[in-house]
Amino acid sequence: MARIGFIGLGNMGLPMAQNLIKAGHQVEGVDVSQGATDKLKAAGGAVAETAKIAAARADVVITMLPAGQHVRDVYLGAGGIAENANAGTLLIDCSTIDVETARDVAAAADEKGLLMLDAPVSGGVGGATAGTLTFMVGGPERAFVRAESILRQMGKTIVHAGGAGNGQAAKICNNMILGISMIAVCEGFVLAEKLGLDKQKLFDIASKSSGSCWSMVNYCPVPGPVPASPANRDYQAGFTAAMMLKDLALAQDAANAAGATTPMGAGAAALFRLYVGQGGAQKDFSGIVNFIRGAN
Ligand code: NAD
């Protein structure tokens, strides 16, 4: 069993850390919010005051932080993980961040003799709680081999996507496809309403035809056809529109930096920015159907 420092005990990090405790690891958590560390304590974990203290005592450090700047600060800042972890420590950043920061942090870790992986996840809070997350992992093979059994205690599908940053690349490509396909499905259902075509009829036909996709079949943005989708609970998230906008913005930054042409991704980012700006931030991302309908 490993001594694991877990930094960032929010909506995702806390249930992930809890699964590691259940699997028998010694977990020492760090968060700037005392409410979060109290919950870890209640779940049988220990608490360290700073990332520096946790990193110096750990075999493995896992981070689950809001965005790239937090990751840069916690790893590379004064008193950060890179400076204080012992050589050979395995570092796994599960946050969703920009590819460039992931690669910069990995290079700095490598210089210090640390093994670093970027391992963003898909599956949301439900997947984090159930231990069924998908991990998209970037970094050296020997780090991946060491991390796999630990990741398996928090997730079901673990894919090594290549070198440093490739986990983040996979995550933003996937979520760009998701953001675009959700808008496409919303537009189809809104057009059907205007044409007097019943939503269940459209679903019965399109879900078995060439327009079928995950956003329609598993997460239909109108109430009725897929009872488990957030549309049936007034678009209670789920995956918030604010998070989708974050990922679409990361995809646009990466596309601009790499010279990739992604006009649909740019359009999806623009529409989600408007929806979020008009009060949709904390709604499920499929709630954008109301914005497209003009009824927000
Ligand atoms: P969250 O805001 O609930 O949790 C982040 C935690 O990090 C908070 O508890 C915060 O206090 C803590 N934190 C911030 N700065 C810190 C620091 N310097 N030191 C220690 N702790 C610090 O966010 P979340 O929903 O858990 O998401 C975490 C990451 O996972 C994000 O990058 C997000 O994009 C990604 N993600 C989230 C979901 C989801 O459905 N929530 C799904 C997939 C991926």
Image: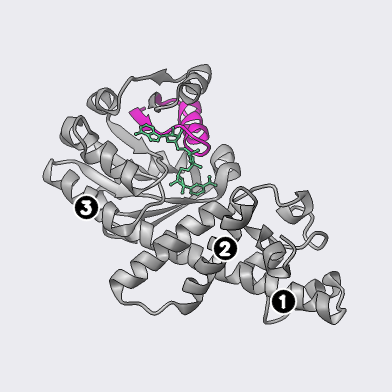
97 over 54 or under it: above or below: below
Residue at 22 percent of width and 44 percent of height: 115
Which mark is in front, 1 or 2?
Answer: 2
Residue drawn where x is 30% and y is 24% of the image: 50
* Bounds of the magenta segment: 1-26
First in sequence: mark 1 vs mark 2? 1
* Helix, strand or loop at mark 2: helix
Horizontal and vertical percent position of residue 17: 46, 31
From mark 3 to mark 1, how far is it between C-alphas? Answer: 41 Å
Does 80 sit left or right of 168 as displayed? left
Q: Secondary structure at mark 1?
A: helix
Asked if residue 164 lies left or right of residue 199, the reply is: left
Q: Write the residue at 54% across / 41% down.
A: 128
Residue located beneath label 1 in the image: 188
Q: Is residue 25 visible?
A: yes
Q: Which residue is mark 3?
A: 104
Looking at numbered disc 2 in the image, what kind of residue is underneath it?
Answer: Leu
Distance CA(mark 1)–CA(mark 2): 20 Å
Q: Position of residue 178 (x, y in %)?
A: 55, 65
Cβ–Cβ below 8 Å for labels 3 and 1? Answer: no
Q: Dot 3, crowdedness within 10 Å: few (<14), some or many (≥20)?
A: some
Q: For residue 233: magenta?
A: no
Residue drawn at the location 15% of the way across and 35% of the way down: 87
Image quadrant containing the N terminus: top left
Which residue is outermost to the front?
Answer: 278
Judged from the image, the secondary structure of the residue bearing numbered disc 3 is helix
Q: Decide if ligand 1 comes within 8 Å of the CB at mark 3.
A: no
Q: Mark on residue 274? A: 2
Is 296 in front, or is 66?
A: 296
185 displayed left or right of 250: right
